[in-house]
Amino acid sequence: MKSYETVIGLEVHCELDTKSKIFCGCTTQFGGEPNTHVCPVCSGMPGTLPVLNKQVVNYALKAGLALNCDITRYCKFDRKNYFYPDLPKAYQISQLYLPICHNGYVEIETESGRKQIGIHEIHMEEDAGKLIHDEWEDCTIVDYNRCGVPLIEIVSEPDMRSAEEVIAYLEKLKLILQYLGVSDCKMQEGSLRADINLSVREVGSDILGTRTEMKNMNSFKAIARAIEGERKRQIELLEEGKTIIQETRRWDDNKDTSFGMRSKEDAQDYRYFPDPDLPPISISEAWIKQVKNEQPELRDEKMTRYMKEFEIPEYDAAIITGSKVMADIFELTADLCKKPKEVSNWLMVETMRLLKVHDMEAEEIHFSGNNLAKLIGLVDKGTINRTVAKKVFEVIFTEDIDPERYVEENGLKMEADDGQLRTVIENVLAENEKSVQDFKAGKTKAMGFLVGQTMKTMKGKADPGMVNRLLTEMLS
Amino acid sequence: MISDETIKYVAALAKLDLSEEEAVRAKIDLSQIIEYVNRMNELDTTGIEPMSHVFAYENVFREDVVTNRSERDVILSNAPESKDGGFKVPKTVE
Amino acid sequence: MDLTKLSALELGREIKNGQVSAVDAVKEQLAVIKDRDAKYQCFISVEAEKALAEAETVQKKIEQGEYKNSPIAGVPIAVKDNICVKDMYATCASKMLYNFKPGYHAAVIEKLKEAGAIIIGKTNMDEFAMGSTTETSYFGETKNPWDIERVPGGSSGGSAAAVAAEETPIALGSDTGGSIRQPSAFCGVTGIKPTYGTVSRFGLIAYASSLDQIGPIGRNVSDCAALLEVIAGHDIKDSTSVPDLDKNYMLALVDDVKGMRIGIPSGYIGEGLDPEIRGAVTKAGKVLAEKGAIVETFDLDMADYAVPAYYVIASAEASSNLSRYDGVKYGYRTKEFTNLAEVYKKTRNEGFGQEVKRRMMIGAFVLSSGYYDAYYIKALQVKALIKKAFDEAFKKYDFILGPTAPTTALKSGNNLENPLKMYLGDIYTVSVNLAGLPAISLPYGIDSKGLPIGLQLIGDAFKEKTIIRGAYALEQTRPAIRPAL
């Protein structure tokens, strides 16, 4: 079999985190009863007109500049005409001829090293509604809540060569956009969507093969699977001497395969033309400068700073800054308790563990740095021991409780009374003669058992270090 | 210049289910009109910027504020068919 | 006193003086409509109850001293059926919207209400404003009050005829390629198409977004100026709406054209023009010269290319604007269907009339890949050249004078058989829309068939006051005309 190279380009749609929609004053809030976040404008009622939300332009500029793009100083909106029930005006207001950003790039890092992925263009557009397939009746229900939510579409050059590179690219985009605060990039909620354009060619060739477009991958894992599957499918076809049809394929994660979408009987001729209802946008030097100045610290900068300022190892800094939510909690908590290494530990170990347990993404963390700082304080003061602290943290993680109150209410304070502890230890030693003998005979493991028994009697509310010391003293 | 194919194509784009007679009529009308419209080619327009907006307005914006509240009754009031708070259509196939 | 024979301003004064109550004005108007509209069919829907209730409210407020600065408080007004009035029908004279009632007012309607005007009904029009005769209406044809075997013009035929037939003192129309001016000319009334962006398009059911404007139709220039003042103004819901407008149009109602430079395009008054209409233009030119204006003919470049450019651009935009009519969200839906594709195709084929379908296809064609550059982009370039030609003309002239239409009112019956011939009737009006300029049509004499002749004054952008002044002066030089009703 010949050796094939996979050529991949991405079209990433990202919902912008503005308060209101791109062309009307409806809320962009996710969810809600059908058609309750809808007005005559975003539902395409006769006689209604669009008015552009300035923040959408700001966010698009922020994204473009952070992705090293040139800004198209004079840009327009165009109408993309097609019929589908989720598109109330039967045209989508988008940008074809003069997209707001062009000619950018993003640097990714994979096993094979660093690489630049080109960004062809970024444009603003409006999102469409949702189709809900009715279970009881053979029909579909249309909900326009999502219509008009602002999107930026980031179109890459076909520079990627593997699923690994694609994932790295997506992770990088996600991080940058989250750090900028322009989108929460939650794939599960649909605020980040990726369409994959994939073709294959023999290694050494510089002619692009026929590409297919794949849609409907709802997670990074699904994207990786889709890429593998499509690469295989195309190679198989070529090896059999067949041609690849340029088409859109829908990925089905349950079946782990893609299906050619029913080629619409009518041509997909979108008949783009400049939207006469919207005046062009002229972006001044001053505006660009202002956006540049307002750019917050991005991930790479932050990572370097953490390593320097807080003396955290690169690996840890990478994980903590791997999500803006986590980075924000880290900074807040460290600022409160002044113990960055402690904070880092709690995030790296317990938080990461609990994320896995609850099958959550870092973006979904909802406990506050305040409470973590308090917890660290309690351990520091010796009010509770680490074992108890871990248990309390689990509750902080899920319910964001105030640990000081929680410890009070549940009587979790360590009992550090020296005298009481000695009494308990005396009893333990008395009841465990054999272990005492074992220890004196050199079996150091017996110490652990005795500590354990003491802790048990104390119902865990003792400082293991202290118990250890006392036991050692009393056994000598 | 306007062939039967063209009529079929533009009718499909416009989502019109023309009858035989309508298609025949459309071919005659469109041919006549497009031929007439072709006279624009008599004008030399090299270097002329296509004017999509007649006056030089730019940067018309609104602030990012939520000003609307739910008005679902109004939105659905003219719906030919609705169900469960949404517009009802035949099942869509992906 | 027959209230329905008064002009809007006259009626407004009588109401303010307490001589007449708004309720009586509306009552009388509704009675005339009831009596006459079976003959002329100007209205698609008449809202008698709502109008009377509104009149009561407005009258009370007038008595309490409100609407002091509104000259048309208490005055009835008819509104073209492509302009949204909340909870009233807005059918666009189409089967596609036969039962549509918007839950929102057009911006102009809010302004009418602020001024205390009383909406009595929605007038007939060509379907979705596409046409020049009002014969494409799904609800039947409107008759020209001057001769019921003739058309009132279009697409605002219902509004113009209603004013001519004294079924309303004033009305709102819309103009994309001449749809206010041409029916005004055919019906012997006055109509203004404002500069693009002067009047908000929010709530005007779109035909061609870059060309559409709402404007006044009335029995004289003063009524039109007064109504224009009410409806003009910036609107944040329309991004193409112009800020900082000087809308004191009534200040221009001055009979003085001394020193004004007036140009008559020689191409306009050439061979193809009805000689009687040419005569009216020439006469008007002489009269204005006698009043102290400087009148001359000149070459207005690009005149031959306006109609093709217009039909390409208007059809293209319309094909996009009318795609939303698909049987899903509002309006007509086909009765029998087995899948979504059928809902779309059958609804649209059954819901739209011939002319609309024709333009949907032309629009799809000129925007389709392969033809976009040759047709749509080309038309936008021609548009730029047309604007340039007008800019040059307005360096020399204060306004341009010419005919509104190449003929007086056409006989009804077979106009739709030859669409191209019908399109050529727009020859004097479409270039004005392409350039976004203001224009007024006013009646100037009657031809040998007893039909009114309309003259058009075209002004530079935002120079409504200039053409209002010119029209007002011209208006004073001949008697008012009324059809025999």
Image (cartoon, rainbow, N blue to C red):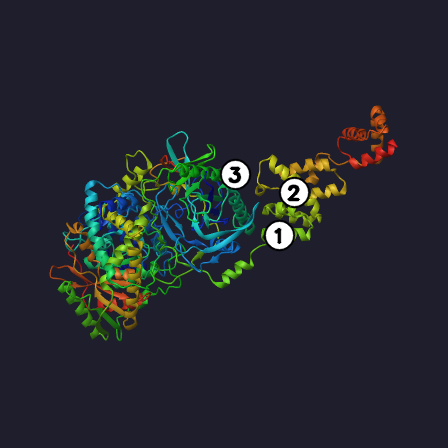
Number of residues whose C-alpha sits closer than 10 Å to that of mark 1, classed few (under 14), some (14–19) or many (20 or more):
some
Residue ID for mark 2: A347
Drawn side of residue A476 relative to residue B20, left or right: right
Question: Mark 2 to mark 1: distance in Å?
Answer: 16 Å
Q: Residue furthest left?
A: C448
Which residue lies under the disc numbered 3?
A221
Residue that sits furthest to the front in the current view:
A1
Same-chain status of marks 2 and 1: yes
Q: SS for tag 1?
A: helix
Which is nearer the N-term, disc 3 or disc 1?
A: 3
The numbered dot on residue A302 is 1
Q: Chain of mark 3?
A: A
Which mark lies nearer to you, 3 or 1? 3
The location of residue C417, given as percent across then percent down, is 16, 49
Q: Chain of mark 1?
A: A
- Three-letter residue code for mark 1: Lys
Alpha carbon of mark 2 to alpha carbon of mark 3: how far?
A: 24 Å
Is tag 2's residue or tag 3's residue first in the polypeptide sequence?
3
The kind of residue tagged 3 is Lys
SS assignment at label 3: helix
B72 or A95: which is nearer to us?
A95
> Where is residue A235 drawn, in percent x and y?
43, 39
Q: Quadrant for the N terminus of chain C, please.
A: bottom left
